[in-house]
Image (cartoon, rainbow, N blue to C red):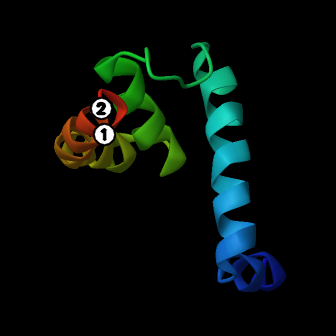
């Protein structure tokens, strides 16, 4: 477990791992893989699942979706240029 923790401190490894884990989490949840068309409910579920299962993970998903919305508004402006 310590080796995995150490690997996650490397930004390249970490970013690649998050992408794979998000795809796997969508499979676990029985939803389509994430895209620009992913619903807010599915995004919230993915954010929660990334942080585990149970009430604490669900709470994290509810809290993080607000930040996601702010960032997505800015990203959407960039995509629409």
Residue 28 lies, in percent from the top left, at 66, 25
Image depth: mark 1 or mark 2 in front:
2
Q: What secondary structure is marked by label 1? A: helix
Toward which corner of the image does residue 69 lie, by quadrant? top left
Q: Who's the residue at 45% across and 22% down the image?
A: 36
List the single residue furthest toward the right: 3
Using the image, determine if residue 34 lies above or below residue 62. above
Q: Who's the residue at 71% across and 34% down the image?
A: 24
Toward which corner of the image does residue 27 lie, by quadrant? top right
Residue 5 lies, in percent from the top left, at 70, 80
Using the image, determine if residue 62 lies above or below residue 14. above
Q: Who's the residue at 78% across and 77% down the image?
A: 1
Residue nearest the observer in this picture, 54 or 34: 34
Q: Is residue 19 left or right of residue 63?
A: right
Marking on residue 78:
1
The residue pinned by badge 2 equals 81
Q: Is residue 54 visible?
A: yes
Q: Is residue 7 left or right of residue 58?
A: right
Residue 66 lies, in percent from the top left, at 16, 42
Q: Is residue 52 visible?
A: no
Mark 1 touching mark 2, by CB under 8 A? Answer: yes
Q: Who's the residue at 61% across and 26% down the image?
A: 26
User: What count of labels does the image hold?
Assistant: 2
- Badge 1 crowding class, 10 Å Cα cut-off, few under 14, some 14 to 19, many 20 or more, is few
Q: Is residue 51 left or right of residue 28?
A: left
- Badge 2 crowding class, 10 Å Cα cut-off, few under 14, some 14 to 19, many 20 or more, is few
Marking on residue 27:
none
Q: What secondary structure is marked by label 2? A: loop
Toward which corner of the image does residue 55 lie, by quadrant? top left
**For the residues marked 1 and 2, what is the alpha-carbon distance in whole angstroms?**
6 Å
């Amino acid at each position: 477990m310590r080796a995995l923790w150490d690997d996650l401190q490397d930004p390249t490894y970490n970013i690649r791992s998050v992408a794979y884990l998000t795809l796997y989490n969508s499979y676990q949840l029985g939803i389509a893989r994430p895209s620009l068309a992913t619903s807010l409910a599915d995004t919230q579920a993915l954010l929660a699942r990334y942080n585990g299962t149970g009430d604490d993970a669900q709470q994290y998903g509810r809290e993080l979706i607000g930040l996601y919305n702010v960032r997505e508004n800015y990203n959407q402006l960039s995509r629409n240029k």
